[in-house]
């Protein structure tokens, strides 16, 4: 049997996931679930950036030329990122 002291109200609880008095999470799993729930709430409340909105509009545009241009630019950015990662890996290998 595990006794845990609530960090909010100071009540001792016997093998409980949540405090009997204030319903605060006590077990590590309950604390992780609460942190994840808070994180999801914050993400849901965030306003998407202008770049995200623009890329979604271009990706789902009704004009095929816009969709093709988006794919080309996205592909070039992907190749540039891969090239940069490869160069960083090569630099790390040379220092070893």
Image (cartoon, rainbow, N blue to C red):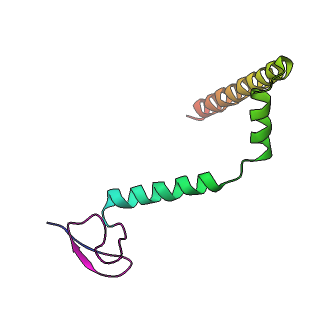
Give x and y (percent) for residue 93. 58, 30
Instruction: Give left or right: position of 15 versus 90.
Output: left
Nearer the observer, 5 or 53: 53
Nearer the observer, 57 or 3: 57
Figure quadrant of the N terminus: bottom left
Outermost residue, bottom direction? 10
In the figure, residue 23 lies in which quadrant? bottom left
Identify which residue is drawn at 80% across, 18% down: 68
Instruction: Give left or right: position of 25 versus 78.
Output: left
Give x and y (percent) for residue 64. 82, 17
Figure quadrant of the C terminus: top right
Q: Is residue 44 magenta?
A: no
Q: Up-down: is 51 above or below 16?
A: above
In the figure, residue 45 lies in which quadrant? bottom right
Give x and y (percent) for residue 60. 75, 27
Chain part drawn in magenta: 6-25
């Amino acid at each position: 049997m595990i006794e845990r002291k609530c960090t909010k109200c100071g009540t001792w609880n016997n093998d409980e996931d949540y405090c009997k008095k204030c319903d605060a999470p006590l077990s590590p799993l309950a604390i992780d679930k609460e942190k994840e729930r808070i994180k999801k709430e914050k993400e849901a409340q965030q306003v998407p950036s202008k770049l995200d909105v623009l890329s979604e509009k271009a990706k789902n545009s009704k004009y095929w030329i816009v969709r093709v241009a988006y794919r080309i630019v996205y592909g070039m950015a992907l190749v540039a990122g891969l090239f940069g990662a490869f160069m960083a890996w090569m630099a790390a290998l040379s220092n070893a």
